[in-house]
């Protein structure tokens, strides 16, 4: 689904705002969980565990890491799956993030990073962690259009499927932060089912007020 012509300038502005925001984070905190606006490495990696439920790590595969930051997912894979044969491309709209990326030296890994707002190749799988959470000051319709367009691109760039995560609606007594995007799982589950004819698996109840969608081609 392409963006309506009237939304195209707004989506370009979204990309520019996101790039500025995360560039500031990585320059302030360096290549760390805080540098990509997570609170700590253990919860950052807990999210990776959920996303990677999409992939069959017992065999070689190719992976697009959308919004890769400094490449934390790649280094996580190198530590957790030492025998894995992986063809990895990490993309991020912040050049400062890509400048911090250092692929592990692994003969079984082919890894590269690219500063871009697009996904320039088709891989077996695509994943994205946290890229929809911080909406800044964007209106609802513009942010929803940004999410839909990104999901469209991830589907088109994935032979087998893609995985993304979202913040779930705030619970009783939780503070709400206007800059964060929270949504019920059904909203984007239905979108992926209808737009892509995909099988969508919901992963939740992993200790955070979040959820992960595993979207598999039929």
Image (cartoon, rainbow, N blue to C red):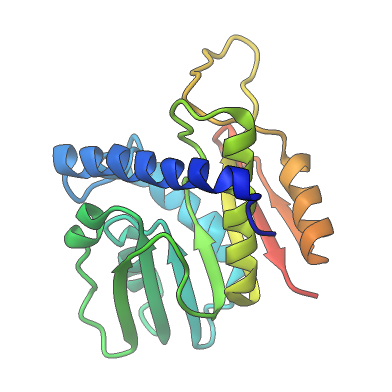
Left/right of residue 121 with respect to residue 91 in the rendered view: right
Q: Can you say whether 112 is above or below 10 in the image?
A: below
Q: Is residue 171 above or below residue 163?
A: above
- Quadrant, the N terminus: bottom right
At x 20%, y 53%, the residue is 96
Tell me the residue at 22%/38% (across/down): 24
Rendering coords of residue 137 (x, y %): 46, 25
Camera-nearest residue between 150 and 171: 150
Left or right of 92, for residue 204? right
- Where's residue 38, x and y in %? 36, 38
Image location (x, y in percent) of residue 45? 41, 52
Q: Between residue 125 and residue 75, name the one nearer to us.
A: 125
The reply to whether residue 73 is in sight is no
Quadrant the C terminus occupies:
bottom right
The residue at the far front in this view is: 5
**Image quadrant assignment for residue 125:** bottom right
User: Which of the 4 image quarters holds residue 162?
Assistant: bottom right
In this rendering, position of residue 209 left or right of residue 40: right
Position of residue 187 in the picture relative to residue 52 (left or right): right
Q: Residue at x 32, y 55 (%)?
A: 69
The image shows residue 144 at horizontal and vertical percentages of 63, 40
The residue lying toward the viewer, choosing from 8 and 16, is 8
| Number of on-image labels | 0
Residue 49 in sight: yes
The residue depicted at 49 percent of the width and 50 percent of the height is 47
Q: Residue furthest top?
A: 173
């Amino acid at each position: 689904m392409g963006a309506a012509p009237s939304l195209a300038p707004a989506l370009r502005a979204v990309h520019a705002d996101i790039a500025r925001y995360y560039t500031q984070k990585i320059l302030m905190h360096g290549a760390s969980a805080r540098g990509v606006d997570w609170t700590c490495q253990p919860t950052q990696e807990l999210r990776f565990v959920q996303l990677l439920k999409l992939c069959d790590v017992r065999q070689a595969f190719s992976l697009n890491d959308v919004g890769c930051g400094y490449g934390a997912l790649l280094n996580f894979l190198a530590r957790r799956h030492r025998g894995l044969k992986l063809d990895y491309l990490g993309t991020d709209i912040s050049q400062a993030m890509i400048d911090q990326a250092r692929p592990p030296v692994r003969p079984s890994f082919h890894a590269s990073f690219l500063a871009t707002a697009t996904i320039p190749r088709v891989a077996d799988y695509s994943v994205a962690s946290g890229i929809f959470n911080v909406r800044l000051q964007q209106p609802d319709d513009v942010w929803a259009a940004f999410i839909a367009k990104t999901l469209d691109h991830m589907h088109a760039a994935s032979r087998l499927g893609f995985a993304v995560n979202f913040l779930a609606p705030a619970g009783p007594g939780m503070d709400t932060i206007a800059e964060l995007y929270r949504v019920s799982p059904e909203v984007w589950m239905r979108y992926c089912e209808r737009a892509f004819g995909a099988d969508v698996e919901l992963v939740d109840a992993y200790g955070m007020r979040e959820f992960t969608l595993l979207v598999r081609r039929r």
